[in-house]
Image (cartoon, rainbow, N blue to C red):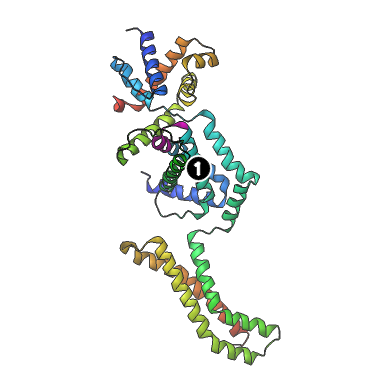
């Protein structure tokens, strides 16, 4: 939940982006993780999440001048675009019969989905704060889906050393996240 | 249990949910906690994706691609809400005073005498005002329909919108009448 001061700062940033579209990059950086996490939660696989995220930001960028500030966070508008982009994606995929498996539980409540989106967003942001070697391992394992052996070859360490780095990275993340996952 | 065994178990668990989306218990509570947390990282954005999309969006705008051109055009003609309302009100005011402005131009160019123009303005002005008021009513209706007729906010919104639109209408209409009065045509 944004405070009144944060909302005002966001309004100024949106208006500045409407006048100078180059400033949209700042809005993009601010909301990328959340929109991607939302797309991933809806789609369940990386390729679909990337398509939906890209569609969302392209549409937002092209229609930014039509956005009217009404005192609600910019993210509400972005999420609406993302929800429509996800629906369009599945419509296209079902027409082409390339529908990928949908993630998670279809019956999951909006509350649970929202919690999942926020949890993923938080985790993605925490990964960027990991020490360099731990971060490299986590990004290659989860972002590029490389095996331990492939990671070991890239960073020039043994399989055992990479597993240890991976374990340490997860312990670091767990310490930052707290006991909420226990 | 040795550290090495724990590392192996966590890794096997991560492999399982990356490839098969299964999060199986390892028999080690500590490792299971880490594996559950790690499952939230499945689908972590690929390293280059964010930067590529960012470059595509921003460079479109900078390098003048079709989408960039469209965005620049929209940005160039876009109004914030207040300016848009004032422009719309001013436009209606200009319609109301069109006979004054038109008559003044015709007179200045020497196509009609001052008396003929004055007579025209006096006859025509009620019709122009009526048309402009109808336009303004339609404009306000469209605005409120777009924003939704919510009882709680309608009165406040109507006052705010009415003040901006009506103010701009009044200023522009007064200016057009002032012009014809200054020329002695009204």
Mark 1 Cα within 10 Å, few/some/many (few <14, many 20+)? some
Instruction: Farthest residue to the right: give it.
Output: B110
Q: Give the vertical position of B96 relative to B65 (above or below).
A: below
Query: Residue A35: where, in percent of width, then height?
Result: 44, 39
From this viewpoint, is residue A117 visible?
yes
From this viewpoint, is residue B186 visible?
no
Q: Which residue is mark 1?
A: A55
Query: Residue A178: where, in percent of width, then height?
Result: 32, 26
Query: Residue A97: where, in percent of width, then height?
Result: 45, 37
Secondary structure, mark 1, is helix
Q: Residue at x 42, y 28 (%)?
A: A126
- Quadrant in which residue B120 is drawn: bottom right
* Chain of the residue under label 1: A
Q: Residue at x 35, y 21 (%)?
A: B35
- Quadrant in which residue B74 is drawn: bottom right
Residue nearest the viewer, comparing B158 with B23: B23
Is residue A38 located in the magenta-colored stretch of the structure? Answer: yes
How many numbered marks are there? 1
Query: Residue A72: where, in percent of width, then height?
Result: 39, 50
Q: Residue at x 36, y 12 (%)?
A: B6
Is residue B54 located in the magenta-colored stretch of the structure? Answer: no
In which quadrant of the rendered image does the C terminus of chain A lie?
top left
In which quadrant of the rendered image does the N terminus of chain A lie?
top left
Q: Which residues are magenta?
A: A37-46
B56 vs A178, left or right, is right
Residue nearest the viewer, comparing B65 with A14: B65
Q: Give the vertical position of B28 relative to B168 (above or below).
A: above
A31 vs B176, left or right, is left
Q: Which secondary structure class fits the magenta region best?
A: helix
């Amino acid at each position: 939940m944004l405070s009144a001061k944060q909302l005002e700062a966001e309004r100024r940033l949106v208006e500045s982006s409407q006048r100078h579209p180059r400033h949209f990059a700042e809005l993009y950086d601010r909301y990328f993780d959340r929109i991607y996490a939302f797309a991933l939660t809806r789609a369940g696989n990386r390729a679909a999440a990337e398509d939906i995220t890209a569609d969302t930001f392209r549409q937002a960028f092209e229609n930014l001048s039509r956005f009217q500030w009404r005192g609600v966070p910019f993210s509400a508008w972005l999420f609406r675009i993302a929800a429509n982009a996800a629906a369009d994606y599945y419509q296209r995929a079902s027409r082409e019969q390339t529908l990928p498996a949908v993630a998670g539980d279809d019956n999951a409540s909006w509350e649970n989905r929202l919690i999942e989106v926020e949890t993923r967003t938080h985790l993605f942001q925490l990964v960027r704060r990991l020490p360099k070697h731990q971060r490299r391992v986590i990004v290659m394992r989860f972002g590029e889906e490389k095996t331990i052996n492939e990671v070991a070859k890239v960073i020039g360490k043994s399989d055992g050393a990479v597993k240890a780095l991976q374990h340490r990275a997860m312990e670091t993340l767990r310490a930052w996240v707290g006991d909420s996952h226990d | 249990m040795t550290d090495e065994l724990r590392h192996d178990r966590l890794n096997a668990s991560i492999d399982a949910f990356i490839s098969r989306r299964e999060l199986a218990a390892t028999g080690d509570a500590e490792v299971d906690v880490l594996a559950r947390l790690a499952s939230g990282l499945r689908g972590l954005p690929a390293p280059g994706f964010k930067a590529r999309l960012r470059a595509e969006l921003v460079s479109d705008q900078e390098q003048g691609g079709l989408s960039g051109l469209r965005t620049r055009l929209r940005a160039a003609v876009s109004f914030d809400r207040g300016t848009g309302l004032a422009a719309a009100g001013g436009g209606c005011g200009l319609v109301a005073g069109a006979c004054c402005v038109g008559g003044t131009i015709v007179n200045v160019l020497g196509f009609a005498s001052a008396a003929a123009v004055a007579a025209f303005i006096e006859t025509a002005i009620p019709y122009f005002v009526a048309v402009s008021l109808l336009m303004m009513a339609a404009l306000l209706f469209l605005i409120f329909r777009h924003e939704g007729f919510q009882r709680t906010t309608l009165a406040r919104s109507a006052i705010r919108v009415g003040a901006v639109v009506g103010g701009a209408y009044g200023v522009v209409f007064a200016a057009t009448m002032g012009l014809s009065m200054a020329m002695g045509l009204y």
